[in-house]
Image (tube, rainbow, N blue to C red):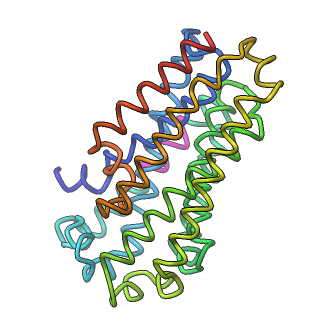
Amino acid sequence: MRELFQVLRLKQWIKNFLIFVPLIFSKNFFVPEKFILTIYGIAIFCLFASSAYVLNDLIDYKKDKHHPVKKSRPLASGALKIKNAVVLLILLITISLGLAYHLNPYFAASGISYLALNLAYSLFLKNIVIIDVMVLASFYVIRIVSGGVLIDVPLTPWFVIMTMLLALFLGFGKRRHELTQLGDNAGFHRISLKEYSTYFLDQMISVVTSSIIIVYIFYTLDETTKLHFNTSLFPLTIPFVIYGIFRYTYLIFQKEKGGCPTNTIWSDIPLLIDVALWVSAILYIIQ
């Protein structure tokens, strides 16, 4: 039973709370019907995400046996049998698709897109330099879009751009950590790492972090934003975003973290406080 929970990667479910973002910025956070609908959507997307993780482990378990960290995963270590993982995958996909379609056919389509892109990533896209990180970033964008589809709220280009940039930041940080931790064996564990260097990744991180801050500042100052939310207080949230980006950058370069963005964020109290303050400020300003 323990192995089943491990292969589902429950800690990674936190990413699915991105589905909340359209609810918050559409000023529907305190609308019971849409709040509950979003909760259901998050729960279902957690099943989609776990399906993708099981699928990835089934494809990579032989290579994972030689990875210093991934070798302890249930399939790579032999703690979970292949046939049991296949049965679990079929159940997860069947249940998640059924529930998603019942909730919203377009939401189900988002889930299918997520699974299809994950399959393509696991099979070949992860081996293509730069494209691999862009695909990882797309998974975050799909979550945001799914949240908008679920409550029938159109997303502004600002949200898609900011989500993509933030996800690229996390993705390049992840690749940098892998490259430094695996050293000369990096290319064996992930083909695309042969084409990366710490210098190049440092440049990409620098470009993306600057872009995130600039885009967010423009968003808060944009007249459309002021008119939509009927407030000019959004610039007050800029310091939280700047600190959050700088703090995570500090964790990447000074603490050599970032290999698992979820664990990196959850293990850093200052960053968690900053995120909580940013969310609280946003809710106060727009409600």
Q: In this rendering, is residue 213 above or below 114? A: above
Magenta residues span 92-99
Q: Nearer the viewer, residue 261 or 144?
A: 261
From the viewer's perspective, is residue 76 above or below residue 101? below
Magenta-drawn stretch contains 22: no
Residue in the image at 63% along x and 72% along y: 131
Along the line of sight, the residue nearer the viewer: 236 or 6: 236
- Could you tell whether 89 is left or right of 142 in the image? left
Please state the total of marks drawn on the protein image: 0
The answer to which image quadrant residue 31 occupies is top right
Task: Please state if 149 lies on the left or on the right of 208 as rendered.
Answer: right
Position of 216 relative to 285 (above/below): below
Residue 219 placed where, x, y %? 72, 34
Describe residue 173's horizontal placement relative to residue 127 as left or right.
Answer: left
Q: Percent from the top left, x then y, of residue 50?
A: 40, 51
On-image quarter of the C terminus: top right
Q: Is residue 98 magenta?
A: yes
Query: Residue shown at 52%/19% (left/top)?
Result: 281
Up/down of 79 relative to 93, above or below? below
Q: Residue at x 59, y 74 (%)?
A: 125
Comparing 30 with 115, the one in front is 30
Q: Residue at x 61, y 51 (%)?
A: 112
Q: Main secondary structure of the magenta part?
A: helix
Give residue 180's position: percent from left, percent from top: 35, 77
